Amino acid sequence: MNWRSREVLQRPDYAMHRALYKSMGYSDYDLDRPIIGIANSGNRIVPGHYNLDLVSEYVQQGILQAGGTPVEFGVIAACDGVAQGHTGMHYILPTRDLIANDIELMMQAHRLDAVVLLGSCDKIVPGMLMAAARLDLPAILVAGGPMEGGCMFDDRAADTTSLTEGLGMLKEGRIGLDEYLELEDRATPTCGSCSFLGTANTMCCMAEALGMSLPGSATIPATRAERLRVAQSSGRRIVDMVREGHHARRIINSAGLENAIRLGAAIGGSTNMALHFPAIAYEAECDIGMDELERLCSTTPYLARMNPAAAPNVPDFHAAGGVPAVMRELLPLLHGEALTVTGRTVAENVAKAQATDDRIIRSLSAPWSAGGALAVLRGNLAPDSAITKPAAIHPDMQTFSGRAICFDGEEMAIEAIMDGKVQAGEVVVIRYEGPKGGPGMREMYTAMKLLYGRGLALKTAVVTDGRFSGTNNGCFVGHVSPEAAAGGPIAAVRDGDRIAIDIPQRSLHLEIPELEIQKRLETWKRPAPKFTRGYLALYSRLAESADKGAVIRHRIP
């Protein structure tokens, strides 16, 4: 076989390279087999990655069983939860491109034959998929799995977001300090990606739907033995993929990407899919823009409801049949012939799948709603697009009109909400939080959760050029493009202006004359950059707008 690794391990010309491997204990037997990279983002600071070193052991077992040689290397992984509500969130989205670059550089520098991608959380999984598409080598993604739900709180199993919602309740006097502190101890009982359908679990589910993970594997809870068996199976499968010449772009192509987006819409996935899948498509040299996203989401029925749209969490979804059950229902809308890492088609993979709980997964003929789990809005406030998530928004809030109250950054908005300065009937505008202006396009998670905790979720709206966590609910519109730092109309909004949100009509409008908007923008001045050194200074100069996936473009036309 003409494996890449043989290019640099042939004798006698590459005896030095073999000697370097042998210095670590590798044998001639090891070096005569496919060399499989394991890109492991395991660490001891991110709950979703805490178990990945153990998962990696089982992947390595599988690679050895199938006749390959595993070589592991580390990949950074930052926690959105730990980074919430402070300067750290600026750094989260920019890690995505660093992860893609890191994997590309390690794989290419060492001429490895294939890669197993170990990740679970928000920017890590899309960064790894971007790398797989860019490299176009045999690749398979193994997720670490979701954590179990915690104690009962607010009529559902608690999770990490319960603490932020609870803080608003504490400030309002709706719960006491002792109850709140007990919640801290009982909300997150195991490691794993957060138990709700946030961006982490959304991306793992979409990776499975794309065909890059073994069927049924995305939602196996982190602490289950089944998680380790799947890791071992994935290790065996990647060696077979090398021998078959089964490269990533046979999977990450237009058909696979469309399947993944439809699955994301059908489960009410995170709005961040609108950021990550255009970026993955860019790496695969496919064209997935906002118009295509809207077409796919608006024509995909909403089949599976879970937290934040309903009480069940992701482990409950897994027990109900998980991704394969939803994809079997969706087959008439999918590219059933699309290939997957199994070597079989999507249709073949899900042929025997079955939903076992219609309180979570509905049939195609009786969906929770006809479509629009994600929606692309446009209007004079978002000429290029904005993103919202109808599946997480109460029907009474699908249209909302209110007075703007403007904040040039997340911290000022959080302070105002905590101090009770945001009132019912207002639209909270949080700007200069886009890819360039943030920089890094922070999540407005804390502001939304505090509004919920203060009883304002159904009485206010949030509009931002930043983004949202997959667990946000209320009335929210993010990814407003062009962003304020690029001179977009959101920079022209003033306190007291009326903003109209109409999700069924896909519109977002600032209700002042167009001439007044232009007049204000003519006197607008670009603010000084928030970061003048380090990676964020570079990122703010290079990142594209949200409607283009906030990618750092690297292809020469």
Image (cartoon, rainbow, N blue to C red):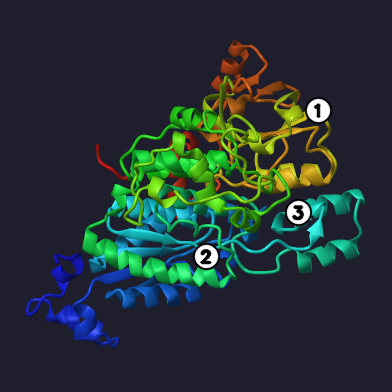
Dividing the picture into quarters, in which one does residue 556 lie? top left
Q: Which quadrant would the C terminus be assigned to in this image?
A: top left
Compared to residue 132, the image places residue 330 above or below, namely above
- Of badges 3 and 2, nearer the viewer stands 2
Which residue is identified by label 2? 144
Indicate the secondary structure of the residue bearing disc 3: helix
Instruction: Please name whichever residue, 439 or 244, is drawn nearer the observer in this view of the structure.
Output: 244
How far apart are labels 3 and 2 at the CA level?
Answer: 25 Å
Q: Residues within 10 Å of mark 2 (few under 14, many from 20)?
A: many
Q: Residue at x 70, y 35 (%)?
A: 393
Compared to residue 330, the image places residue 97 above or below, namely below
From where the camera sits, is residue 278 visible?
no
Q: Residues within 10 Å of mark 1 (few under 14, many from 20)?
A: some
Q: Where is residue 496 drawn, in percent x and y?
A: 76, 23
Callout 1 amino acid: Gly
How far apart are labels 1 and 2 at the CA level?
Answer: 42 Å
Callout 3 amino acid: Thr
Which residue is identified by label 1? 425
How far apart are labels 1 and 3 at the CA level?
Answer: 22 Å
Q: Where is residue 5 drawn, in percent x and y?
A: 20, 69
Indicate the secondary structure of the residue bearing disc 2: loop
Q: Which quadrant would the N terminus be assigned to in this image?
A: bottom left
Which residue is identified by label 3? 164
Compared to residue 258, the image places residue 211 above or below, namely below
Callout 2 amino acid: Gly
Q: Residue at x 75, y 54 (%)?
A: 164
The answer to whether residue 415 is left or right of residue 317 is right
